[in-house]
Image: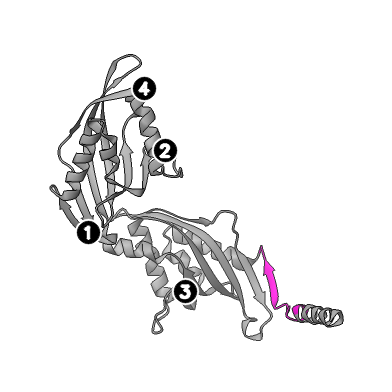
Amino acid sequence: MKKILLLGLMVFTIISYSQKKKNGTIYIEHPAIDVVEAMTKAFVEGDAEKVGSFLADDFKSWNGTSSNKDAKAGTKESAMKNVGWWNKNVAYLSIERSGEAYPDAIEYKDEDQKDVVWVQTWNQLKGVHNKTGVKIDMQIHRLYTVNKDNKITMVINYGDGTVWQELRRSYAPRENGTVYNHHEYINKVRRMMAALENNDMDTFYSFFDEKATFSNIHMPPGTKSLTLEEEKEGMKKMLENYEITAIDVQGYPDYINYELGDAKVVQSWWKVRMTRKSDNKKIVFPLFLIHDFNDEGKITGDIAYYSKFLMEK
């Protein structure tokens, strides 16, 4: 049995080594990389003629994320027109190397690749669309082929298509649900705040789902939301130091039933009056609340915006 295992390991090792076959050389510095980066610089500067000078007459461009089998390649002419569109429609345009990434130039040994060098790049594309204000900030990966005359013959683009979807949608007004100024969920929020004003905490927490999460403006970005039990503990400590004397609604709450994602959200504005027990100081501060509801009518998310400074000064 031991001999069989050893033989098996030897065969596996031989197979592993036999599967390795060198098929070219990768360069970190290469004239083809210089051409690609010079063309990219000209693109950002909006110089269509200079971009065209780096492209072969039979240049083709492809969308690497498209599944359209009938898609036609972009041409040198369309690429030069594209420079003008970006220059006219996108502000603060930049295309820089992504993080610590750097381009590679690959010279393959394959006979059908002997006349071109492949260049692959990883960049961060940034800009702001002038008309819609849509922010463009995404990683892009591109594969180029450069011929012996240092002309780019092809590029395959890989990027985040959702950015362009948002841009197209932003050209025209679009409804995204319904806003209510009277609704049962609004009534629940008002009853919940009335319970808090009257120190009826059992009723106050009865409006929340047991898996509800809580956050506020003072929590650093990336901080994990509080659980219901953690919120109860924090509220208990707050009520030990402050007495709530009044919570009055400002304006009127909105209930928004969003079409996208079927989100159910109540936004409400309040004026909170408290007395600090340590020195009997009267405190008044505005409070903005966002509550997410589930299909059962329970609050699943609570976000609070208020000034801690007004409470502590």
Magenta-span inclusion, residue 17: yes
The answer to which of marks 3 and 1 sits earlier in the sequence is 3
Q: Are marks 3 and 1 in contact (CB under 8 Å)?
A: no
Q: According to the image, label 3 marks what residue?
A: 64
Q: CA distance from mark 3 to mark 1?
A: 31 Å
Q: Residue at the far top: name it.
A: 279
Q: According to the image, label 4 marks what residue?
A: 312
Question: Residue at coordinates 65% horizontally, 81% vertically from top-left?
Answer: 114
Q: Residue 287: which disc?
A: none
The answer to which of marks 2 and 4 sits earlier in the sequence is 2
Front label number (1 vs 4):
4
Q: Nearer the viewer, residue 172 or 79?
A: 172
Q: Quadrant of residue 22?
A: bottom right
Q: Nearer the viewer, residue 172 or 297?
A: 297
User: Of the residues shown, which amino acid type is indicated by label 3?
Assistant: Gly
Relative to 238, 104 lies left or right: right
User: Of the residues shown, which amino acid type is indicated by label 1?
Assistant: Asn
User: Of the residues shown, which amino acid type is indicated by label 4?
Assistant: Glu
Front label number (2 vs 1):
2
Highlighted range, magenta: 16-29
Relative to 162, 273 lies left or right: left
Secondary structure state at the residue bearing disc 1: loop
The answer to which of marks 4 and 3 sits earlier in the sequence is 3
Front label number (4 vs 3):
4
Measuring from the top left, give residue 61's x and y in whole percent: 46, 75
Disc tally is: 4
